Amino acid sequence: MKVDCVDISTWNSGVNYNAVKADGIVAAILRAGYGREVSQKDSQFETHYRGCRNAGIKVGIYWYSYADGVDDAEQEARACLAVLNGREIDLPVYFDMEEAWQTSMGSTKLTAMAKRFCETIEKGGYRAGVYSNLNWFYNYLDYDYLKSRYSIWLAQWSGSYSLGCDIWQNSETGDISGISGNCDTDIIINRALLDGDIPEPCDKEIEKVQRWLNESYHCGIAKDGIYGYETNKALVKALQTVLNDDYGADLEVDGIFGRQTEKAVRNLERGDYGDYVRVLQGFLICHGYDTGGFDGDFGARTESAVRTFQQVRGLYVDGIAGRYTFRELSE
């Protein structure tokens, strides 16, 4: 998946916003400030906001929290709204929760703080969300509750993300044209967050999968690097063909993952090899997971991708790709 968003703050000065846009960045999440006072506005906020708008880069906002309670979180939201002062933005306003000392307050209180911040932001006329890392969402926030109500921006600096999210912050050491030094980079998973018609970025790994489907199974799909309906259907057709050829499943090759296809699925596990594994890797790659290659070899990194996918989808985590894993992958 291609980086298409950055988050920037006072630590990123002298930005060439047109160069950032030319590097494929369609959105930037700007730190508006921190704490409970309007005077704690980020020193680069005005410059970043104006520069992004002029360059045609979509804008989101985050506010770094030092809140020590629910009322304090509301005060931070009011300070954020005062800084925004009715400005138009395109993505939500995110409550940035990551201070280590705050964890002593426990999940119930921290979740209530996030809720109060988001409610206050929404009353101010903006969409709201919560930013934090995997540890916080697992141990210090009620992730399911927050995800059901607000946008989720997940910080997980790795090859794939382990929780459902709208935006995935995948690195703190990004190299983006127009920004000096390393910067935080992000991938917008939920494209519906963006206002306007922004096309999906071309993903070269997905393009490899599409090329293989066309060459091996004559699918005739576009090699555009976008995982859409046609690519999904082609992968299911490839799966059905492999099950027929290798296991005598006698399935109709229609690209629909129905009951008969699910029943025909055979388990795949580490050490397996062949086109069946390549179909599995194709699904995982299209869902944004790093399989260590698209080579039909079920190795350690493919197993890790399966385990992470199973965890995210609430499946039994064993690293074995069986009927339930394939069912979720085909959705």
Image (cartoon, grey):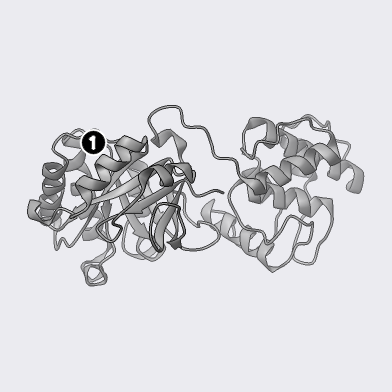
Q: Position of residue 24 (x, y in %)?
A: 49, 43
Is residue 90 in view? no
Q: Position of residue 311 (x, y in %)?
A: 54, 58
Along the horizontal axis of the image, is 209 left or right of 184? right
Along the horizontal axis of the image, is 274 left or right of 321? right
Pick the residue in front: 122 or 226: 226
Pick the residue in front: 317 or 226: 226
From the image, tell me which residue sits under label 1: 126
Q: Quadrant of residue 202?
A: top right
Disc 1 residue crowd, few under 14, some 14–19, many 20+, Cα 10 Å: many
Image quadrant occupied by the C terminus: top right
Along the horizontal axis of the image, is 135 left or right of 79? right
* Number of numbered markers: 1
Residue at (17% x, 62% y) in the render: 66
Residue at (21% x, 67% y) in the render: 105
Q: Quadrant of residue 301?
A: bottom right
User: Measured along the vertical axis of the image, is residue 19 above or below residue 234?
Assistant: below
Q: Quadrant of residue 36?
A: bottom left
Along the horizontal axis of the image, is 126 left or right of 157? left
Q: Amino acid at mark 1?
A: Tyr
User: Measured along the vertical axis of the image, is residue 224 above or below residue 270?
Assistant: above
Is residue 244 in view? yes
Q: Position of residue 278 (x, y in %)?
A: 77, 52
User: Measured along the vertical axis of the image, is residue 90 above or below residue 102?
Assistant: above
Q: Position of residue 20 (x, y in %)?
A: 42, 47
Q: Secondary structure at mark 1?
A: loop
Residue at (83% x, 60% y) in the render: 273
